[in-house]
Image (cartoon, helix red, strand yellow):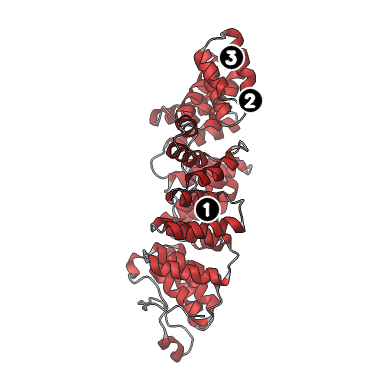
């Protein structure tokens, strides 16, 4: 198999500590060229992995580890050099070759990246995620016919991956094969659990095929794709992120997509090197509270250095609710409203405070406002929950009941929606908006 050439050598700031003179002079270990621009936490990590390479210069796994550390901290050219060294020692390293491909792609060296990814797939031809990644890159380069072939291969290997269905559907559409793409989307739509991006692409297909009414119906449910498709090839990379901004960004990404429990280890690391990051502090406080460590969660907020934001005051209010300090919670949520009066989640918290204080009228008002704001942002799940709480506390107006039903329909909760619609029609049989909602229910 062709060995991937080792790239140009970079200046090292590693100390010469051990190893043979012959080995150390034969190859330099890639590190960032500007020592002053490297954060201390990143420098310590790269010194550690680089020294391990220096002491075992012919060990491809040490090169792989050093390349991964460079990659995790966005030094992609340097990472590609390290991965190239690993592969030159042992060409049978599909993960190193896969990471080399991505490093090259991130460094905007697209043709080299595709060659490296194809080399990796020659080693692991059954890796469907790799074929999907190749198709994604080919789509981005406008190579639609190649993208379709790669996406079909990925789908053949595993038709259950939602990301693969997206890439294959997009490649078919780019080739003008709208009927075939639509069939791919309708297979999921018929199950009543399609993600929102399915409707986005389906709407485009319907429009291209002249099915205007269906296009508009799908567009009403449409949303952006989830583009960060999971891939086990990168599972070790997050543990090597050491830069302040990069680690905070990743920790918050994990928090938003996986919840506080899974994000907690990364939040702790991010907080240690970046304690002034307000949202990291707040997210870690939430994670600690969820784990039953309320005192520690509150202490984190008390020790804030910097300007509190809406999320800070909402979390402080949440802790006060947990400790039954409701008057203080009310003060904190008022500060959140002062920063953002249209924060739907803040209205949910205000409703909970009012409910615990026995003010059902105020609680209902806040839950209704939260529901209305969630509807505006198409956050159907949260809207349904807010309207459900309001419905338990007071009689909803016709408009609020219709908004409640709309959220249920968007979520596919048709049985619940059908029951409420029937009640509305019993009161006002010719209401056009209610009838329009009824028309969106599947036939019984």
**Displayed quadrant of residue 38:** bottom left
Label 1 secondary element: loop
- Residue 208, horizontal then vertical, whole percent: 43, 39
Give the SS element for disc 2: loop
Whether residue 131 is visible here, answered yes or no, is yes
Q: Which is more toward the observer, 11 or 415?
A: 415
Residue under numbered circle 1: 229
- Position of residue 200 relative to residue 109, above or below, is above
Distance (Cα) linking label 2 and label 1: 35 Å
User: In terms of sequence position, does the residue under pointer 1 or pointer 3 come before the other?
Assistant: 1
Q: Nearer the viewer, mark 1 or mark 3?
A: 1
Residue 394 — which label?
A: 3
How far, Cα to Cα, is label 1 from label 3? 43 Å
Residue 110 vs 217, above or below: the answer is below
Seen from the viewer's position, the closer of residues 228 and 112 is 112
Pick whichever of labels 2 and 3 is earlier in the sequence: 3
Position of the C terminus, as image quadrant, is top right
Question: Residue 433: x percent and y percent?
Answer: 50, 17
Q: Earlier in the sequence, mark 2 or mark 1?
A: 1
In this rendering, would 411 be left or right of 106? right
The crowding category of the residue bearing disc 3, from other C-alpha atoms within 10 Å (few below 14, some 14 to 19, many at least 20), is few
Q: Nearer the viewer, mark 2 or mark 1?
A: 2
Residue at position x 59%, y 12% in the image: 425
Q: How crowded is the residue under tag 2: few (<14 C-alpha within 10 Å), some, or many (20+)?
A: few
Please name the residue that numbered disc 2 is placed on.
443
Horizontal placement of 340 versus 318: left or right?
A: left
**Residue 353's spot in the image, x, y percent?**
55, 24
Q: CA distance from mark 2 to mark 3?
A: 31 Å
């Amino acid at each position: 198999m062709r060995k991937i050439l080792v790239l140009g050598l970079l200046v090292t700031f590693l100390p010469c500590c051990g190893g043979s003179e012959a080995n150390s002079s034969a190859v330099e270990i890639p590190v960032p060229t500007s020592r002053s621009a490297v954060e201390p936490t990143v420098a310590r990590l790269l010194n550690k992995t680089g020294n391990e390479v220096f002491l075992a210069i012919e060990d491809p796994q040490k090169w792989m580890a050093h390349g991964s550390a460079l990659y995790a901290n966005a030094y992609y050219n340097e990472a590609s050099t390290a991965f190239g060294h690993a592969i030159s020692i042992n060409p049978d390293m599909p993960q190193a070759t896969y990471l080399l491909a991505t490093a090259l792609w991130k460094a905007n060296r697209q043709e080299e990246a595709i060659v490296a990814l194809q080399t990796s797939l020659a080693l692991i031809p059954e890796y469907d995620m790799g074929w999907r990644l190749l198709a994604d890159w080919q789509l981005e380069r406008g190579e639609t016919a190649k993208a379709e072939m790669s996406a079909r291969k990925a789908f053949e290997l595993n038709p259950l991956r939602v990301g693969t269905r997206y890439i294959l559907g997009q490649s078919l559409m780019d080739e003008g094969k709208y009927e075939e793409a639509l069939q791919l989307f309708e297979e999921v739509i018929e199950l009543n659990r399609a993600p929102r991006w399915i409707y986005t692409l389906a709407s485009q297909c319907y429009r291209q095929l002249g099915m205007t009414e269906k296009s508009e119906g799908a567009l009403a449910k449409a949303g952006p794709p989830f583009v960060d498709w999971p891939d086990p090839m990168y599972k070790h990379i997050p543990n090597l992120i050491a830069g302040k901004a990069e680690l905070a960004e990743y920790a918050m990404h994990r928090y938003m997509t996986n919840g506080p429990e899974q994000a907690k280890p990364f939040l702790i690391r991010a907080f240690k090197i970046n304690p002034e990051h307000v949202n990291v502090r707040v997210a870690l406080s939430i994670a600690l509270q969820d784990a039953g460590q309320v005192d520690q969660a509150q202490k984190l907020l008390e020790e804030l250095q910097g300007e509190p934001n809406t999320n800070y005051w909402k979390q402080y209010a949440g802790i006060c609710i947990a400790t039954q300090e409701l008057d203080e919670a009310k003060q904190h949520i008022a500060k959140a409203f002062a920063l953002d009066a249209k924060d739907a989640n803040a209205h949910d918290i205000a409703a909970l405070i009012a409910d615990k204080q026995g003010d059902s009228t105020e609680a209902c008002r806040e839950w209704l406002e939260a529901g209305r704001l969630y509807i505006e942002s198409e956050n159907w799940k949260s809207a349904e929950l807010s309207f459900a709480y309001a419905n338990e506390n007071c009689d909803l107006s016709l408009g609020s009941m219709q908004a409640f039903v709309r959220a249920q329909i968007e979520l596919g909760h048709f049985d619940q929606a059908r029951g409420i619609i029937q009640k509305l029609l019993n009161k006002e049989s010719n209401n056009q908006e209610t009838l329009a909602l009824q028309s969106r229910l599947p036939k019984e």
